Amino acid sequence: MGRGRDSATSRKAQGPTFLSREEVAKHNTMGDAWVIVDGRVIDVSDWAEHPGGRVVFTVAGQDATDVFRGFHSPAAWEHLATRQIGTVAPVEPSAFDKEVLELRKEFRKNGWFNASPFYYTYKTAEVLGIAAAGVFVLHSFPHNWFAVIGAALLLATAWQQAGWLSHDFMHHQVFENRLGGDIMGLFLGNFIQGFSVDWWKNKHNTHHSIPNLHESEDDLHDGDPDIDTLPFLAWSTTMADKARRDPSGWSAFFVRNQQMIFFPLLSFARLTWAQQSIAYALAPLLPETARGGAWGGGRVAPSLRYPVAELVGLAAHYTVLLVLAYLYMTPIQAIAYFLTAQMVCGLMLAVSFVVGHNGMECFDKADKPGFFELQLRATRNVTDDCIGFAGWFTGGLHLQVEHHLFPTMPRHHLAKAAPIVEALCKKHGVRYHSQPLLVGVWEVLECLDVMAQPVIRALHEFPAM
């Protein structure tokens, strides 16, 4: 298991000791990982069964106090003692960080971390209603092309809205008992959407911990997977430079043309995510050499919390699709139905994702700001419209800033927190960025154009690239 892990075991046996932050920083890999939480040094080495997934390793060797507070309920603090190996000297938080922590206490006192059962019952019924409407259309007009395309659009919408809803349940915004959130996540994720929720949780929690952070080394698992889009897209000068130096030339080609390929790529996003998540769920059954990449169960080896439920849910999802195809469609119509639903939903989901963070600041590990400031500088809010479409379309994630600061706050309370957070940012001179949906998308396209320019210039200077 490694000398660092053996040393940690020895320290546990001896009882907590005083450690320097420099010593803690040396333990920054999955197999040898220490983190600091509220002055306590916690050994999380090889903690495959961590309920939140592999996010725990994104802060290996670092102070994880603010990350821990954001993701965990007060009851989770009791578990820290079982893994504590030492203490470190306290560090005074910044004035901004102190006030964010005070806001969390105030919001919790206001009841804004309590979910409305009526709201989430309604949202669940809405998703099931949209999905049922699609089945009704197919049943009423079998083998009809207009019905097939219309039903595919309804399925795409149901998938997108189920995605936002499973997001809320898997952030444990709804139930105090985590099992309830897990069950609803499996139902809405694996069965309704055909996604492995454990795959999603690992990937998404990592993103929350370190949004827009470049990975420093391949084996450290310390970068945001949501900006890991090379060879196709570059969101920063660091990524553009990497594309320019790609010996195959393919990355440079894609990045030079990234504005043009952006929306076509987004349409394939859901197919890619589905493939990765299925590979992730199947990975424990396969030899390591047969697994996918980092998020397909390769480098980030899965430790599924509910392996049987994951696979049963996925099998049931695709069985239902096959039954619908057999009953109501020709083979060609079935292919069109499946691809239309996948590609339209991919666009709907991906537009919501990219407008939240892409085109905002990206960071290397060496210049990463504190946790709360990182969330602000890497995140863009979307101004809701008079009919509330942006809020519905993005599943409440038009208020990405507030969601990233308080990820366990139910979405129906975020709008109350937003003006208070904005005022706090203004007070401390921290950027709070909000734009209408289409303006936000335009900013993303502008970023793609800016990042493509050095790669285009390199082509003119070195035409052989």
Image (tube, rainbow, N blue to C red):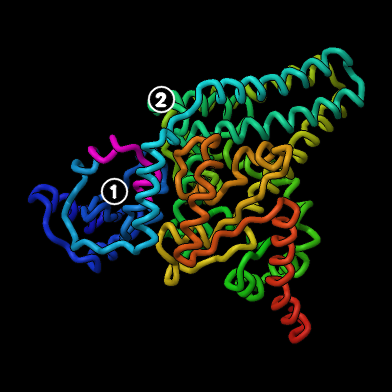
Residue nearest the observer in this picture, 442 or 31: 442
Q: Looking at the picture, how far across and down is residue 183, in whole percent? A: 48, 23
> Is 374 located above or below residue 101 in the figure?
below
Please, what secondary structure does the residue beneath circle 1 have?
loop
Give the class, few, some or many, for how many residues have Cα within 10 Å of label 1's Cα (few <14, many ≥20): many
Task: Report which residue position mark 2 lands on.
Answer: 179
Quarter of the rendering occupied by the C terminus = bottom right
38 on left or right of 182: left
Image point (55%, 25%), residue name: 120
Question: So how many labels did they put on this image?
Answer: 2
Q: Which residue is mark 1?
A: 44
Residue at the (41%, 46%) spot, across then down: 54
Label 2 to label 1, Cα distance in Å?
23 Å
- Write the residue at 72% across / 56% down: 441
Is 145 above or below relative to 235?
Answer: above
Q: Amino acid at mark 1?
A: Val
On the question of residue 85 being in view, the answer is yes
Q: Amino acid at mark 2?
A: Leu
Whether residue 281 is visible, yes or no, is no
Q: Earlier in the sequence, mark 2 or mark 1?
A: 1
Q: Is residue 308 within the magenta segment?
A: no
Give the residues drawn in magenta, as a range. 67-78
Q: Nearer the viewer, residue 378 or 248?
A: 378
Mark number displayed over residue 438 = none
Above/below status of 151 relative to 235: above
From the viewer's perspective, tell me whether residue 406 is left or right of residue 233: left
Mark 2–mark 1 CB contact (< 8 Å):
no
